[in-house]
């Protein structure tokens, strides 16, 4: 019997989706499951996007150019200009979601054995993409007690060696909701410049910043323009997770040429997805405002509710639509499994993502969960009631004095 590859064995399970079979089983038993585990917004996709799909009058659904349609990339130039990100259409490559943009950035910029420094907790799929590229993630730990702010620059420099090739950030952050300050972004810029590293910057949540703090893009950092690779996606911006459209943006022509080879190998990004994404750029300002206001309300509802449950603590996320919360449990994965397999309150339960899957440090995040506030407020309120009851009933509850 042929054996599975080492890469296949090392590939981690998704902490976001690994418990999905248990949720499906719970639903078969008639249990209502509140999905707090995944960043799938329940807010409507822009009507202009849906209309664009309905009104497709093509007789052939052909391949698009490997880098994406020029008309879409030109419209993106105007979109980025609103955020003081000055690029041209040639700097933009359309990808099959932000995930492919990360993967192609790794494949184009890293050699097997190269290392990437990533603040943790971090989006779990970064590890999967690094394994695919033969690269190694080196993490620098941030803590819930300090609101997941970056440690001092010396901690980064302790990890840098001859194999270090890049720093990867997500800003605003998934899973923590943290927003990097100007000082922190300048700290990262100085490291990138000093050691001549790539800076991969995942900025798919830029619309969702809830404080007066400014959004500092990696593209705003002077002196490292050739080092920056920006990752973007329409999935969360327009509730278009299913059309699989993202973008890789860089001023570095050599990186773009390498990325294009991978793009040509997969032929083209989704045709219908690009049609919807391009139309979405014409969504009225009211759409953005309503979505933003809804997330502001949901954030307050969730964080206030979590911190009112005995033994639970969540910092206040500054962006995105996630938080990492600390629970009074022995093991968050066991607790999440128990919620789906053994518990219900009045025929309902909650599904969360164990935060340990967002860390690579052994034991880190063991009593934490990531929660996405992508449900309407009534459902969030109800899910908080169910979570409170679950924590009261859980056999592995741990109350710290």
Image (cartoon, rainbow, N blue to C red):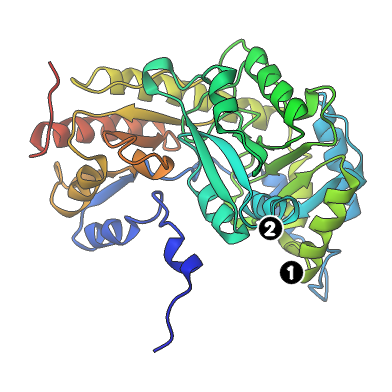
Q: Please report the residue visible at 84 percent of the width from the left and 46 percent of the height from the top.
A: 92
Q: Is residue 331 left or right of residue 86?
A: left
Residue at screen point 74% across, 48% down: 247
Expressed as whole percent of the image width and height from the top left, the position of residue 39 reads 48, 43
| Mark 1 → mark 2, Cα distance in angstroms | 10 Å
Q: How crowded is the residue under tag 1: few (<14 C-alpha within 10 Å), some, or many (20+)?
A: few
Q: Quadrant of residue 362?
A: top left
Q: Residue at x 65, y 28 (%)?
A: 207
For the image, the number of numbered tags is: 2
Most extreme residue toward the bottom is: 1
- For the question of whether residue 192 can be seen, the reply is yes
- Asked which secondary structure carries label 2, the reply is loop
Residue 352 in the image: above or below residue 58: above
Q: Identify the residue under disc 2.
A: 96
In this rendering, position of residue 254 left or right of residue 128: right
Residue 295 location (% of width, % of height) = 51, 27
Q: Which residue is mark 1?
A: 266
* Residue closer to the observer: 214 or 305: 214
Residue 364 versus residue 48: which sits nearer the camera?
364
Marks 1 and 2 close (CB-CB < 8 Å)? yes
Given residues 80 and 257, the one toward you in this image is 257
Quarter of the C terminus within the rendering:
top left
Q: Which is nearer the eye, 362 or 47?
A: 362
The N terminus, quarter of image: bottom left
Q: Report which quarter residue 263 is drawn in.
A: bottom right
The percent position of residue 279, horizontal first and vertical second, equals 77, 47
Q: Nearer the viewer, mark 1 or mark 2?
A: 1
Q: Residue 27 at what x, y percent from top left?
A: 26, 58
Label 2 crowd (10 A; few <14 / some 14-19 / many >=20) = many
Residue name at image x 33 percent, y 35 percent: 365
């Amino acid at each position: 019997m042929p054996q599975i590859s080492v890469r296949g064995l090392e590939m981690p399970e998704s902490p976001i989706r690994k418990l999905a079979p248990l949720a499906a089983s719970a639903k078969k038993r008639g249990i209502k499951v509140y999905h707090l585990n995944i960043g799938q917004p329940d807010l409507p996709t822009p009507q202009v996007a849906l209309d664009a799909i309905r009104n497709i009058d093509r007789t052939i659904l052909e391949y698009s150019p490997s880098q994406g349609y020029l008309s879409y990339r030109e419209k993106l130039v105007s979109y980025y200009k609103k955020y003081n990100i000055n690029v041209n259409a040639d700097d933009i490559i359309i990808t099959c979601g932000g995930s492919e943009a990360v993967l192609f950035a790794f494949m184009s910029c890293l050699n097997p054995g190269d290392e990437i420094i990533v603040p943790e907790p971090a989006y779990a799929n970064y590890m999967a993409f690094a394994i695919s590229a033969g690269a190694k993630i080196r993490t620098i730990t941030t803590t819930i007690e300090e609101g997941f702010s970056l440690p001092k620059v010396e901690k980064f420099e302790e990890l840098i060696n001859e194999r270090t090739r890049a720093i990867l950030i997500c800003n605003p952050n998934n899973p923590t909701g943290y927003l990097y300050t100007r000082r922190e972004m300048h700290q990262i810029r100085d490291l990138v410049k000093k050691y001549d590293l790539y800076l991969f910057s995942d900025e798919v949540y830029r619309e969702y910043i809830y404080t007066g703090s400014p959004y500092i893009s990696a593209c705003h950092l002077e002196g490292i323009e050739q080092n920056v690779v920006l990752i973007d996606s329409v999935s969360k911006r327009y509730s278009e997770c299913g059309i699989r459209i993202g973008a890789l943006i860089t001023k570095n022509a050599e990186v773009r040429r390498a990325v294009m080879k991978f793009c040509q190998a997969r032929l083209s990004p989704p045709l219908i997805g690009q049609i919807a994404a391009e139309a979405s750029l014409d969504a009225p300002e009211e759409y953005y405002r309503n979505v933003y206001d809804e997330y502001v309300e949901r954030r307050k509802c969730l964080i206030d509710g979590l911190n009112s449950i005995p033994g639970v603590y969540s910092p206040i996320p500054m962006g995105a639509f996630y938080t990492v919360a600390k629970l009074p449990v022995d093991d968050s994965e066991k607790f999440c499994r128990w919620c789906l397999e053994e518990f219900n309150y009045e025929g309902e339960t909650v599904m969360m993502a164990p935060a340990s899957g967002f860390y690579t440090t052994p034991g880190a995040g063991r009593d934490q969960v990531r929660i996405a506030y992508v449900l309407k407020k009534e459902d969030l309120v109800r899910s908080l009631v169910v979570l409170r009851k679950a924590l009261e009933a859980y056999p592995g509850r741990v109350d710290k004095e």
